[in-house]
Image (cartoon, helix red, strand yellow):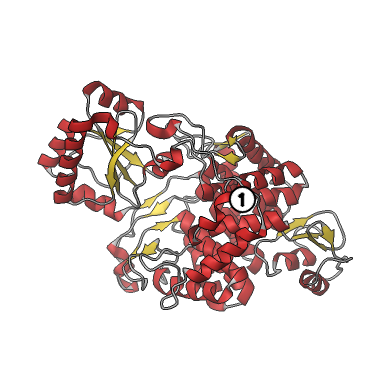
Amino acid sequence: MTFRDGTLVDWHEWGPDPFEAADRTGKPVLCSLTAPWCEWCHRMDEETYSDPKLAANIGDSFVPVRVDIDRNPRVRERYNMGGFPTTVFLTPDGEVLSGATYLGLDGMRQVLDSVRESWDAKGATAGSVPRALSGEALPSGEVTADIEAHMVEQVAAAFDEEFGGWGTGAKFPLPQTIEFALKRDRQRAKRTLEAVQTHLYDTYDGGFYRFAENRSWGEPHREKLTDENAALLGAFTSGYLYTGEESYHNAAEGTVDYLTTTAWTGEAFAASQADSDYYLLEPTDREEADPPHVDTTVFADRNGMAAEALFRFAAVTDHEGATRYAERALEFILDTLVDDGHITHFDGEDSETGLLADHARVLSGLTAAAQVTGPDGWLAPAREVADDAIDRLVDDGAFLDGDPKGAGLLDRPLRPLETNAEMADALLDLWALTDEDRYRTAATDALGSFAGAYDRMGVEVAGYAAASARAHYDPLVVRTPAAGTDLHRAALRIADHEKVVVPGDRENAVVVRSGTETVPAETPDELLERASEGPSP
């Protein structure tokens, strides 16, 4: 692992050894979850973990473990206490004793004393297992139109009418919620795009910051993550598709430039760029300053997301560079991280393999490539990636986040809602591209595993509602002649970002809704007319 600053704590790496040491010595585990891009992690290293007395106290009373959350996403999902850094205290079996996010020196001293006192009094019986890992049955149900309707209500109810976006605390851009709303509540989506562009877009270097500390979008956290930039590139591309608003195009194009320059390793997309005072400098001063640290690790999931977003932008704008970089990134991932559909998270001996997020997002990139550039070379690996995930990760309908094995609570199965929705969405695209019903079945089963709880879902999981709507109604499918033809290019520009374009060996184009085709279109204008009509009788 590589972190920007050392500390005085003698950290163990994640794995079975520190838990065995904790069991042998009768100590709890102090697990520090951090990331190369995380400025508050860096501050905690400087202000807390570099204090000699505190470091000695940790070494005497705890088994300290440091985890890079980007490289260990399953650890992140099980132990995240609401932000990063996360400091979580564990029993030797990996159960949770207590946890917090950033802790200054005094706060850490108090927490250490409190945890130690609880441990001395109760031992491992003080530990608990997060509810998502408790083994309870998932709230399965039927995928119906009610899921979409409920989310439409939530988008309106949770909207901040004064400042835009959703919620009244820290403001996250929520790109999947924006995309859901663009098709169903466009004015609120547009207001959010404008707020995100005004407050989180870097007008000089391009790309978006992660989030803002307060309701009015003030005090932004200026990390730039490739996956979050890819998601926002998709949202602004969709905004431009629906509205033709040039400012959305400009923000999207600036993000393409950021991804293909600063975030480009020469072979694929880097993981992230750190927060820094650099972003507060005037443009002329930035020219002379060192830019923030870039973590050049190539992660499969982030490259899948970036490729999909670049293909979508190219589909709407004919941006040749976006297509070229997307193809290069996917080819690199397929060559280095994919083996017969089984994906390695990153190129390293300590990398996990077969993670659901990697499969879902690489599959999305591959299906986007098939739609924009044609199926040759993309559908075969797409099938392999999908089949590997279906064969290994499906458990009672839903997908597990990975093979349930490893230290701590990694041996407990986790079925993440949002990543299941991403996988289902990609499988619906693959179904439309291949006409193979097993992909639609797997998608519907995964979505149905959570459908019984739809009425308790908030705007943060709008992607689930969008995927459920596509599964319930079937996505709009446009079958066209070969990629690059006028009819194919017109199909890509139909104002429905949830559609699937299927280029093939045909002379005309048809629009398919719920299995029923329109009258064939011979020209782009006719195709646009067909897309606005209902199905033929």
> Mark 1 Cα within 10 Å, few/some/many (few <14, many 20+)?
many
Q: Quadrant of the C terminus?
A: bottom right
Asked whether residue 237 appears in the rendered view, the answer is no
Q: Residue at x 81, y 56 (%)?
A: 515
**With respect to residue 386, does 459 lie above or below?**
below
Tag 1's secondary structure?
helix
Query: Measured from the top left, where is residue 270 in percent x and y?
Result: 45, 50
Asked whether residue 168 appears in the rendered view, the answer is yes
> Please, which residue is most extreme toward the left here?
53
Query: Measured from the top left, where is residue 469 in percent x and y?
Result: 65, 58
- Residue topped by disc 1: 364
Q: Residue at x 61, y 64 (%)?
A: 149
- The reply, left or right, for residue 7 in relation to residue 322 is left
Q: Residue at x 51, y 56 (%)?
A: 456
Query: Measured from the top left, where is residue 446 in percent x and y?
Result: 61, 45
The quarter holding residue 236 reads bottom right
Q: Which amino acid is tagged 1? A: Ser
Q: Residue at x 61, y 77 (%)?
A: 244
